Amino acid sequence: MAVQAVESSTTSSGPADSAAAAGSSVSLGPAVALSCRECGERFPLGPIFACAECFGPLEVAYDLPTGDPEGLRRRIEAGPNNIWRYAPLLPVPADVADKPNLNPGFTKLVKADNLARELGVTGELHIKDDSGNPTHSFKDRVVAQAVEAARAFGFTTLSCSSTGNLAGAVGAAAARAGLRSCTFIPHDLEQGKVVMAAVYGGDLVAIEGTYDDVNRFCSELIGDPAGEGWGFVNVNLRPYYAEGSKTLAYEICEQLGWRLPDQLVIPIASGSQLTKIDKGLKELIELGLVEDKPYKIFGAQAEGCSPVSTAFKAGHDVVRPQKPNTIAKSLAIGNPADGPYVLDIARRTGGAVEDVNDEQVVDAIKLLARTEGIFAETAGGVTLGVTRKLLENGVLDPTLTTVVLNTGDGLKTLDAVAPTSGPTAVIRPSLDAFRDAGLA
């Protein structure tokens, strides 16, 4: 995948190349360059996502505001109640607050005492509930970053390959920003996600095949004249887009009173969210905003699409692609781009990568709803299901501070729980019928 994408982006002659060539003149806040995660080669800021030397992925390098952690902390706390409070740590223009943006973030960190009792957790258990974002998933965070990069590079159309949530986030953000959107999804997504992606008025294209087929098509489109002027948030804008996930790490630590959690359980689709949360935690340590201490990161996958979990359990460094077959469609990426980096982080931090089956996913969705009043989509069911499995297997320490991510709203994946969720009873409108039903 990475090699195909690099070949497409480096051989095209559209606006992306001219923007990349002029990248050294582009200003994106504290971002100073793009750096290869494999060989360290640096490139000017621009709409490129893979190293021309080794085909490795590129990520944003910064000139971070070191030297005054107390001043930085006060500046952050005085900022708006959204991701832009962390603008000094993100690749955004200085005037982003003056531009139309959905302004996601600063979602609730719920102290889940009822759930903790149910699971036998004696330490702090928190749910980072990102269903409170504008389009009800964490994807609003990453798209907000991509929109600002798209503006800086002069793109007129915002696009993506998506398993559902991202298409909705791109459609909404583009509408707000006054840009055209054209997004691509697998043909068999949940209807709730299809409707939400389509309602914002952009073009929504369903492609026959899996997400990996959709992603390959988008990589080809970037190198074609038909894709000129298009910013693909998770392809040629990916280095900037991915940085939005760092705000989850920033918020969690700030909401914990500027301290690191001991354990985090994070869902894995492409794996980018997990790797950027780790990056965000390391930045907070480097900046002196939190005390340096060990933390463990655990990855969660659905059994029907578990290439990273399979590799972790086998002790492999290479992730072998799988064909997805799971109700957790938002995690159904059979060839996850950041899979090897997820393995590195799980092993480096002393964490693990685990998976659960569809039945366990549904049980976990209902457990979270019953105990904490949070209706998670299937990805959240995967993450909580894995949390419960890790606790039962003695892998997660129940005495430590643990944060579990819920990345989306259960209203988008109603089909998963509809067969087992309905009226307790159907009765006539009389007290006798109510009593006869045993509900009094």
Image (cartoon, grey):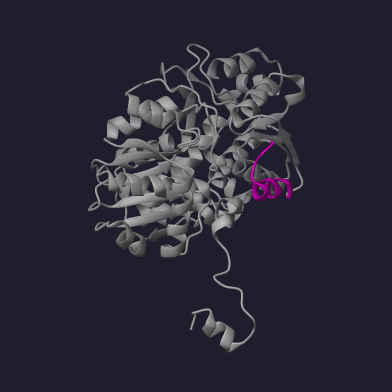
> Based on the displayed image, in which of its 4 quarters is residue 94 positioned?
top right
Question: Is 202 on the left or on the right of 79, as rendered?
Answer: right
- Horizontal and vertical percent position of residue 143: 59, 41
- Horizontal and vertical percent position of residue 297: 33, 39
Task: Give above or below for 268 relative to 82.
Answer: above
Quick one: 215 or 210, which is closer to the camera? 210
**Residue 92 in sight here:** no
Specify whether residue 51 is painted magenta.
Answer: no
Instruction: Identify the residue at image location x=75%, y=42%.
Output: 202
Quadrant in the picture for the N terminus:
top right
Question: Is 186 on the left or on the right of 141, as rendered?
Answer: right
Specify whether residue 189 is painted magenta.
Answer: yes
Instruction: Identify the residue at image location x=71%, y=20%.
Output: 14
Instruction: Identify the residue at image location x=44%, y=16%.
Output: 41
Instruction: Give the magenta part as a residue range.
Output: 187-199
- Horizontal and vertical percent position of residue 108: 45, 59
> Based on the displayed image, in which of its 4 quarters is residue 341 positioned?
top left
Quick one: 270 or 57, which is closer to the camera? 270
Q: How many marks?
A: 0
**Residue 278 in sight here:** yes
Magenta stretch: helix, strand or loop mostly: helix
For this orientation, the residue located farthest to the front is 436
- Horizontal and vertical percent position of residue 223: 69, 18
Question: Is 264 on the left or on the right of 237, as rendered?
Answer: left
Task: Give above or below for 350 relative to 426.
Answer: above
Task: Give above or below for 333 relative to 58.
Answer: below
